[in-house]
Image (spheres, rainbow, N blue to C red):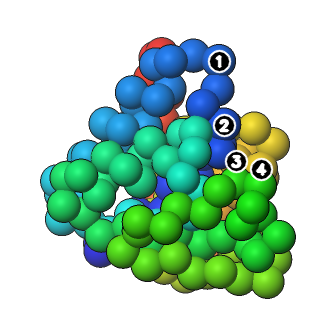
Amino acid sequence: MNSVTVFRGASAGRDITHLRIAAELGRAIAGAGLRLVYGGAAIGLMGAVADAALHAGGIVIGVLPAGLVPREIAHRGLTELRIVADMHQRKALMSELGDAFVALPGGLGTAEELFEALTWSQLGIHHKPCVLLDHNG
């Protein structure tokens, strides 16, 4: 395994614990020598996981649709930021680049990304681990 794709929201959410968990995950991924693949935003839980991985010396690749660059505030400090045409290309590239998927708290987009990864696994399109991180047990 070389890369972990992380799904989570561009919002910080309502629980400050989510930011801490996102940062811990980013540090853990970098500390394990794995590359982080994520949605490319500089804000919210996305920014927290990316910044923590970068500060820990990790490689971070963001994948962001062109239409979301201004809205989600593209992270310009990444190892690599790939701008794609739309959400379909984003999900396909994030799936291609990752060897496993982890979902943190997020909204409908996060849930949709996780369910698509799970569906693709069920259909045999990929055989990559899919993890829903539940910090509250």
If you read the primary sequence from the N terminus, does the residue marked by circle 4 or circle 2 appear first? 2
**Quadrant location of residue 99?**
bottom left
Which residue is located at x 75 percent, y 38 percent?
Answer: 107
SS at circle 3: helix
Is residue 134 among the parts visible in the rendering?
yes
Which residue is located at x 70 percent, y 47 percent?
Answer: 110
Q: In this view, does 101 lie to the left or right of 58?
A: right
Whether residues under marks 3 and 4 lie with C-beta atoms below 8 angstroms apart, the answer is yes
Q: Position of residue 28 (x, y in %)?
A: 24, 47
Q: Is residue 82 left or right of residue 26?
A: right
Residue 14's label in the rendered image is: 1
If you read the primary sequence from the N terminus, does the residue marked by circle 3 or circle 2 appear first? 2
**Residue where numbered disc 2 is placed:** 11
**Residue where numbered disc 3 is placed:** 110
* Circle nearer the viewer, 4 or 2: 2
If you read the primary sequence from the N terminus, does the residue marked by circle 1 or circle 3 appear first? 1
Q: What's the distance in space between the residues labelled 1 and 2, CA to CA?
A: 9 Å
- The quadrant the N terminus occupies is bottom left
Q: Does residue 107 sit above or below 92 in this rendering?
A: above
Q: Does residue 81 sit above or below 53 in this rendering?
A: below
Q: What's the distance in space between the residues labelled 3 and 4, CA to CA?
A: 4 Å
SS at circle 2: loop
Q: What residue type is labelled 4?
A: Gly
